[in-house]
Image (cartoon, grey):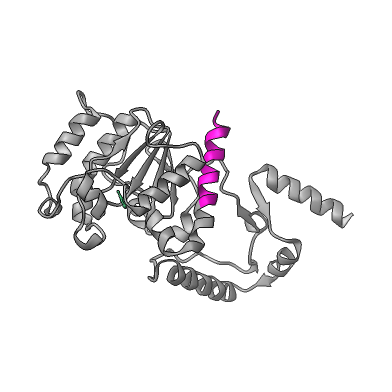
Amino acid sequence: MRQANMTKNKKTFISRGLEPLAPRRQELYNVAMKADDKARVWRFFSLFSDYAGSGYRQAEAFPDFSDGPLFPTSRRVKAVPTSKALAPAAKPLGESGPILPRSGDSIHLIASEVNDCHACRLCEKRQKAVPGIGSAAPLVMVVGEGPGADEDAQGLPFVGPAGKLLDKMLAAIDLSRDSNVFIANVVKCRPPMNRDPEVDEQESCAPFLLRQIGLLRPSYILSLGRVATHALLGCKDPITRIHGRFFDFHGIALMPSYHPSALLRDESLKRPAWEDLKTLREHINAQG
Ligand code: URA
């Protein structure tokens, strides 16, 4: 009887796109706890995940705990990131509201404006600006943080070792900059010494990226790494926490994932990054 109930519960969770925890862990968690104890547990895991994920404490609203089971029944589940529901963006890059193309705009016009741009200090040291490249009707737009040395030399995005890895991973899910992907960056000129682009640099470059998105209207955006994801979603969550999930970016499904440079530094991230790409492919296939 207990077995039959467990099987039924399992089916219900899975049909909702949710995965049940192991029954033993469910029993363990289902202990009546005082609000103080729950706050202590929450604080411990929250600190651990922030420092392990980003090395920094993230400002976060403290949940309002009450006495009772630590995990109410509806939360004793782990979301499998195939759910079609999109979480709302916190505060997207640029103005809120729909992103519309400017009249008379074109990818070539944007590229020539990028090449002539002197709006921020990044233009001073660049060899070549990197406007972006790829399909004129992309299924997916990949957004990185900014050009590195190879990209700066060639004027093309993701052409160094990280780019080669990216191309391989995209090819494994039938995506390519030659057919159905457009690749762009938050900032179009290389930050010196590959430092993170400053907020004012991101802001002065944002109109180019927003025009590219508005014009191309990709079905999906894959934001690679912390800088691109934080810029687009306006959030501060570590990538370790939000990768592989879908967020709403002005009506476009945006999935954050790991930056390929991070995968080259830390092999263990390749597996979760690959899982993210498989999730993206499953989602694309499910949409027909
Ligand atoms: N890293 C990025 O974020 N973008 C590039 O174009 C290359 C490396």
- Above or below: residue 241 compared with residue 104: below
Indicate whether residue 280 is drawn in magenta. yes
Does residue 105 appear left or right of residue 213 in this picture?
left
Which of the two residues, 268 or 232, is positioned nearer the viewer here? 268
Does residue 208 appear left or right of residue 39 in this picture?
left
Percent from the top left, x then y, of residue 94?
A: 26, 44
Numbered marks: total: 0
Q: Residue at x 10, y 53 (%)?
A: 124
Does residue 241 appear left or right of residue 128 in this picture?
right
Percent from the top left, x then y, of residue 201?
A: 19, 53
User: Looking at the rendering, in which quadrant would you find the N terminus?
Assistant: bottom right
- Above or below: residue 5 compared with residue 268: above
Indicate whether residue 16 is drawn in magenta. no
Percent from the top left, x then y, of residue 209?
A: 27, 41
Q: Residue lying furthest right in this view?
A: 1
Does residue 272 appear left or right of residue 154 in this picture?
right
> Is residue 99 visible in this depiction of the protein?
no
> Is residue 122 visible in this depiction of the protein?
yes
Which of the two residues, 134 or 154, is positioned nearer the viewer here? 154
Which of the two residues, 202 or 98, is positioned nearer the viewer here? 202
Which of the two residues, 64 or 7, is positioned nearer the viewer here? 7
Q: Residue at x 69, y 48 (%)?
A: 13
Q: Residue at x 48, y 62 (%)?
A: 267
Q: Residue at x 33, y 28 (%)?
A: 136
Query: Which secondary structure dominates the residues rendered in magenta?
Result: helix
User: Looking at the rendering, in which quadrant would you find the C terminus?
Assistant: top right
Instruction: State which region is magenta.
Output: 274-288
